Image (cartoon, rainbow, N blue to C red):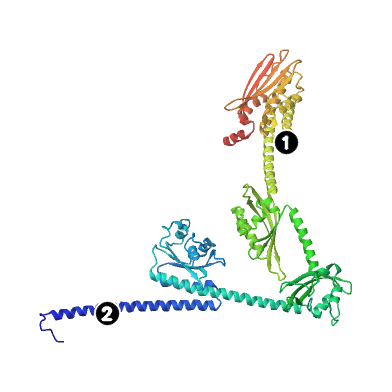
Amino acid sequence: MPMRSDAGPGEGERDDAEALRQALAELDRAKEALRESEANLRDQEFWFAAQKEAFRAAMNGAPLETSLGILVDAAVRSAGDGRRCAFYIADPAGRKLRHVVGMPYAYAKAVEDFAASPESLACGPAIATGKPVVTPDVFEEPRWEPWRWLAQEYGYRGCWSFPVETVAGRLLGSFAMYLPEPRAPSQRDLELGAGLAQAASIIISHEAASDEQRRAQASLRENEQRLTVALEAGRMGTYRHDLRTGEQEWSAGQYEIFGLAPGQPPDRELFMSLVHPDDHHLVEFSAEDIREPGTYLDSEFRIIRPDGETRWVSAHALAIFDASGHPAELIGVNQDVTEQRRLAAAIHTSEERLREFSEASSDILWIRRADDLQWEYLSPAFHKIYGISRQDAMRGDNLNAWAELIVPEDRDTALGGIAKVRAGERVSFEYRVRRPEDGQLRWLRNTDFPIRDETGAVVRIGGIGHDLTDLKLAEEHQRFLLSELQHRVRNTLAVIRSIVRRSAATATSKDQFFTHLDGRIAAFARVQAAVTRDPSKPLDLAVLVAEELRVAAAQEGQGVSIDGPPVGLAPKTAENFGLAIHELATNAVKYGALSVGGGTINVAWSIAAGPPETLEFRWTERSTARMPTPPLRQGFGTEVLERTLAYELKATTTRDIGPTGIACHITIPLDQLSGRQAGEDRARSE
């Protein structure tokens, strides 16, 4: 290359070097462009292959979950950034969205029937407006506040939604991308979303068209099958009646239904002569009747066959009209439904009896479907026992709703029993339920059994639920009474043993021992008899005092007065207090006011304010003469008054013995009279 003559030394070389650097940079840019072009080509080939696979699946009749799932998987693999993708489809009215594929089942349930409106989130406005809705960060968008928990639980921050619509602009659903980090979409993201939405619209439209075609084909097959059955069934007959000429054609089945010999010429007069006179109005039709084209004439009427038998016929006819709009021809099918009506009447009678029985029963009668275990029938007793109406109980997923009423400890037993019946076993099990309206606990026994079809398969589950609550309470009460009886017998034997031992220790002779023992045991027996008259009620103190004085031949009004407020005594308290009063009465007969004529006894008690409240019991005797001197030794009565009452009832007893009378003052804490506190104190001391 020639050099310029005016160029300085080295300048040409520098120009060449610069040109070379520029050429190399241009080459690098060309390589980068080539790499991008190759990457785009690979992306296009990848998406072409994914769309081709999705379209092939749709053409082969695969469900939407499969064909759209291919697109979702391709989008996730292509992005490679941890995003999730999902398709949603709109209902026919375009008001609600249903998840098709992409997100977990729990997420789909949470957004089920999401509203398609401009005021809702992401996919909702995309469906309502037909435009993409981009939320770079759901935690920054106020409308997402009620649903942020869902984004947090499933690990996404950005949400981009693209409408799926037909070429004509009808909105079918939406395509959503969920990004793990907050960001706006790139141009490639927007193109990807639009491309996936367009591919999905083709698949969804094809699915809808295929469904319509399948329904049409199924309807055609069904109509053909019905026609075949109508023509070939032994108990059905077909006919054609030309209303213009009167000509009729009957099938062999038609002759059989009407009890006529095949080949007998049919006509309108013959037909009407066989119809029951009261049903003529149900079958009258002529060429003068003007009706809408395609009118179906359906009726059920009675016929009287030549042999005199009355039968029921179900008729289905179609009127064909001529060019003037008048009916020209009737084509119909008749079926003898006599046996069906008899069977229906018998079933109705049986159902009515079952209904009357179930509504009168205090047990719950129920039936569940075996496939999904949902109730088909519940008797009225359900409301009384469970505290929930039958209508409310049978709504929704009523198996789980029923299980929630069962106490947790019994839930596995109940559900396990249902599973066994579903497998064909008969079972009986007990469980407890808690009524939601009042929290009451009820015991039930279920006797469940399988209901099979003609092939032996279990199609339903039947059961009878019996309320055991009263029986359980009675058993519990019986156990309590038995325990109480055992306790009372032990106490009784202990008291009698103490009476015998102390009476023997203080008696001076065999006769005295017998007399004292007989009186004390008799007093103890009187208390027991009084207590057992009504074990549920405490023994009245006034009754106890009056009874002991009566036995001592002293009655109120004859020098004896009894005065005090109502005071109830527990059985154990009554035993101890009864012995104390017996000893006071016995002492009055032997040494006190009742030992001489003209003596008086005043028994009075009152409740003194506390704390603690106390029973103040006073026994006061007065005699008109000097009373006999009692023995100096400490006997059984002294032990009962001063020791037994103090130990058993925390009582304090004081006695003042004078030459013409005796005064005894007993103070007992009021809470000891019920026997509860005394029993607790003894249990602690033991």
Q: Could you say which is closer to the camera, residue 133 or residue 180?
A: 133
Mark 2 nearby-residue class (10 Å; few <14, some 14–19, many ≥20):
few
The amino acid on which the numbered mark 1 sits, given as a three-letter code, is: Asp
The tag earlier along the polypeptide, 1 or 2, is 2
In this rendering, is residue 128 above or below 640? below
Mark 1 nearby-residue class (10 Å; few <14, some 14–19, many ≥20):
few
Q: Quadrant of residue 673?
A: top right
* Residue 307, percent from left and from top: 89, 74
**Residue of label 1:** 534
* Residue 509, percent from left and from top: 73, 24
Task: Give the residue furthest to the bottom.
Answer: 1
Q: Could you say which is closer to the camera, residue 561 or residue 486?
A: 561
Asked whether disc 1 touches disc 2, contact meaning CB atoms under 8 Å apart, the reply is: no
- Mark-to-mark CA distance, 1 and 2: 114 Å
Q: Quadrant of the N terminus?
A: bottom left
Q: Which mark is residue 161?
A: none
Q: Is residue 591 visible?
A: no
In this rendering, is residue 576 above or below 395? above
- Name the residue: 52% across, 74% down: 203
The amino acid on which the numbered mark 2 sits, given as a three-letter code, is: Leu
Q: Quadrant of the C terminus?
A: top right
* Residue 644, percent from left and from top: 63, 28
* Residue 557, percent from left and from top: 76, 20
In the image, taking residue 157 as reference, residue 462 lies left or right, namely right
**Residue of label 2:** 27
